[in-house]
Image (spheres, rainbow, N blue to C red):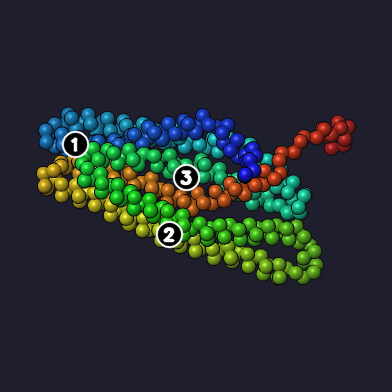
Amino acid sequence: MSKPMSRNEILDAVRVHKAAFWAVAAFSFVINLLYLTPSIYMLQVYDRVVTSRSELTLIFLSLIAVILFAVMGGLEYARSQVLIRVGNAIDEVLSKRVFTATFENNLRAGQGNPAQALGDLNNVRQFVTGNGLFAFLDAPWIPIYLVVIFMLHPTLGWFAVGGTLLLVILTYITEKVSKGPLEAANRHAIQASNFANSNLRNAEVIEAMGMLRPMITRWYRHQANMLQQQTIASHRAATVSAITKLVRLVIQSGALGLGALLVIEGKSTPGVMIAASILTGRALAPVELLIATWKGFSSARSSYERLARLLEVLPPRVPGPPPPENLPWRA
């Protein structure tokens, strides 16, 4: 039977702001709903305004679209501001705790790197309050966009489903090809940082013994291994990302071409053709954003695991009695 999990201070610090994250999710819901505006606007312009030649209808439709775009922009700004404040609050709660735990680790085991631990905290904070979170919040809207495309025309809907599945497969490939090298790069980066941190504290002894050159050689070995693994991961991720962009453009253009074919055959209208192309691009956007942020997600996941282990092994200190008032440094 597995050992029950202990209290997770990182998750506790995030849960304190649960209401703010729900507000961000609500903002994301409305924002994604408003992303339907361009396709609906195009649909109405092509199928109503062009055929009726009504300038008044065009003016009112354009005015409504501009207002909705302004609302969407305001909500995106508000969402970003909320996450910035949440990120600062999380950092304020955890930064001192992480620094103290690293200090305690150094006292007990003679090892510890506050810069590394605080860098891990910054990694997690940036992902939780940045574009990585937006990618996961937007992902549930993919099936909704696909349903709307199906409502326009089933053929276009199935085409969009196929394109989305292809991008999901590319996301899985990105995880598989970059996970190993990224984890190895993180390990070597920590080893290089810890080695430099522990040896630079004894700079005078190293200089006196003439060991600077061997020390640099050993440090650079870790650094070179880190760069090699990071380069492998970056090349693989960049390759998949380039393929993803190509596939997305082909799928979105293909939706337009397929819509044009349906118009020629009299099975659809020009408005449906344009709207389906826009909605297909919108359905693919969250998947492409997930692929673009996957490297950051993998890095944040590794940082979170290291921080969780550190804080679990080294619980918060019990505050001791305050120092006497008559000490010289208290004066």
Which residue corresponds to mark 1? 45
> Is the Cβ of the residue at disc 3 closer than 8 Å to that at disc 1?
no
Q: Amino acid at mark 3?
A: Gly
Question: Residue 288 location in percent, x, y?
Answer: 38, 50
Residue farthest to the front? 1
- Work out whether mark 1 precedes mark 2 in sequence or the reverse, and give the earlier one: 1
Q: Secondary structure at mark 2?
A: helix
Residue at figure coordinates x 22%, y 42% from the top left:
154
Q: CA distance from mark 3 to mark 1?
A: 35 Å
State whether residue 108 is above or below residue 227: above
User: Who is closer to the viewer here, 310 or 123?
Assistant: 310
Q: Residues within 10 Å of mark 1 (few under 14, many from 20)?
A: many
Which residue corresponds to mark 2? 238
Let me know if residue 268 appears in the view.
yes
- Work out whether mark 2 precedes mark 3 in sequence or the reverse, and give the earlier one: 3
Q: In the drawing, what numbered circle is on residue 132?
A: 3
Q: CA distance from mark 2 to mark 3?
A: 17 Å
